[in-house]
Image: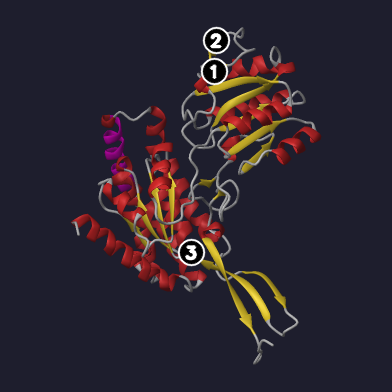
Amino acid sequence: MTELAALMQTIGANARAAATGLGYAPPEQKTKALETAADYLMAHQEDLLAANALDMQYGRDKGLTPAMLDRLELTPARIAAIAQGLRDVAGQPDPVGRVLSEWDRPTGLHIQRVSTPLGVIGVIYESRPNVTADAGALCLKAGNAVILRGGSESFHSSAAIHHSMVEGLKAAGLPETAIQLVPVRDREAVAEMLRMTDYIDVIVPRGGKGLVGLVQREARVPVFAHLEGICHIYLDKAADAEKARRVVLNAKTRRTGICGSAECLLIHRDLVDTLGAQIIADLIAAGVEVRAGEGLHHLPGVTRAAADDFGREYLDMIIAAAVVDDVDGAIAHIRHYGSNHTESILTEDDAAADRFFQRLDSAILMRNASTQFADGGEFGMGGEIGIATGKMHARGPVGADQLTSFKYLVRGDGTIRA
């Protein structure tokens, strides 16, 4: 066994041991751990900023794109948001031990379905160091141990955040190995995690198409994943102009490097030379490159779209735009090019909105709202590990509730089966 394999086996064994007790840890202990971690993070934010400066230099030397550098960068405001996220998760109702349903049988049995932790979760992520806090907090809240493998770009930042999490665990009397961070940059650590069937119950990859595709192909344990956030906004003929201009600009430009950023604007044919033209002008004025399909080439400042410009996750100041005949045209386009992540319709027509909601099967569907709200924190979950676009177990924002399973508790009184 190699040195790295032995290290990963030790981490896995420690996680499995920690998970045994976390399943019945009192809610107050978990809350104290997260609140203490938040306090420690804020008290030592200068250390975190210094660690992040090392990562930012590493990222620049590596040639990361501006969008990826934005994902990596920490500021005092972002650190405060991470700490607040820890407190938000701490304040959520405890998801473990909830009675999900219960019923009596004619035989005299009383049956309950009760939420229970998944066990050990492996989280593999790239350049966003805040995932260290989000994933650690949500897994702990749901009574799970977690093994975190951050990206090489966020190595120092993730280590500093992880240190805060460990301080919280210690203060609460919980095992320090409940939240572990793989302490090496070696990519082989990812391959080792994907094979750790004796220790890890589910893998959650959070990153680009390359990472998630690799995990889905190679993992020997179940995976919660989405490949891409190819989010669409459909500008319906019954859209309110003021709402639409505000929402589209926010959906594209607020933060281009997140999976909820809008990547394609679909415009009802009747609005091409009026509201559609105005919104495209708004985007261009904000510095967005608009790659326009047929029917939009005459608009000032647009770039002609190539065939592969649709169905792409740009994560940059670029958006594709296309003309559709109606809501059914928008639905057909999204079904063909989408990734089942998040879609939004801008309309005052209830029937059009209902049709959009009913006939699309993306994990998140919105009306008159920015796709940037595709976030567990914005859903009131305190945070998220990611947005799952599959249909098994977890879907949409993966928060603490989604990191539980269930078991059946069956009570009788000397009851026997005839």
Front-lying residue, 165 or 325: 325
Q: Give the extent of the magenta segment.
A: 46-60
Front-lying residue, 248 or 339: 339
Query: Any magenta on residue 39?
Result: no
Residue 290 badge: 1
Q: Secondary structure at mark 3?
A: loop
The quarter of the displayed image where residue 406 is located: bottom right
Q: Quadrant of the C terminus?
A: bottom right
Pointers 1 and 2 in contact (C-beta within 8 Å): yes
Query: Mostly what secondary structure, the magenta segment?
Result: helix
Q: Secondary structure at mark 1?
A: strand
Q: Nearer the viewer, mark 3 or mark 1?
A: 3
Label whose residue precedes the other's in the sequence (3 or 1): 3
Which residue type carries mark 1?
Val
Q: Quadrant of the N terminus?
A: bottom left
Label whose residue precedes the other's in the sequence (1 or 2): 1
Question: Which residue position is annotated with label 2?
Answer: 301
Q: Is residue 190 above or below residue 278?
A: below
Where's residue 22, x and y in %? Answer: 44, 70
Which residue type carries mark 3?
Leu
Q: Nearer the viewer, mark 3 or mark 2?
A: 3
Task: Using the rendered image of the protein, determine whether residue 131 is visible from the camera's viewpoint.
Answer: yes
Where's residue 82, x and y in %? Answer: 45, 48
Q: Residue at x 49, y 73 (%)?
A: 26
Residue 181 badge: none
Q: Residue at x 74, y 16 (%)?
A: 270
Query: Any magenta on residue 57?
Result: yes
Q: Residue at x 62, y 42 (%)?
A: 364
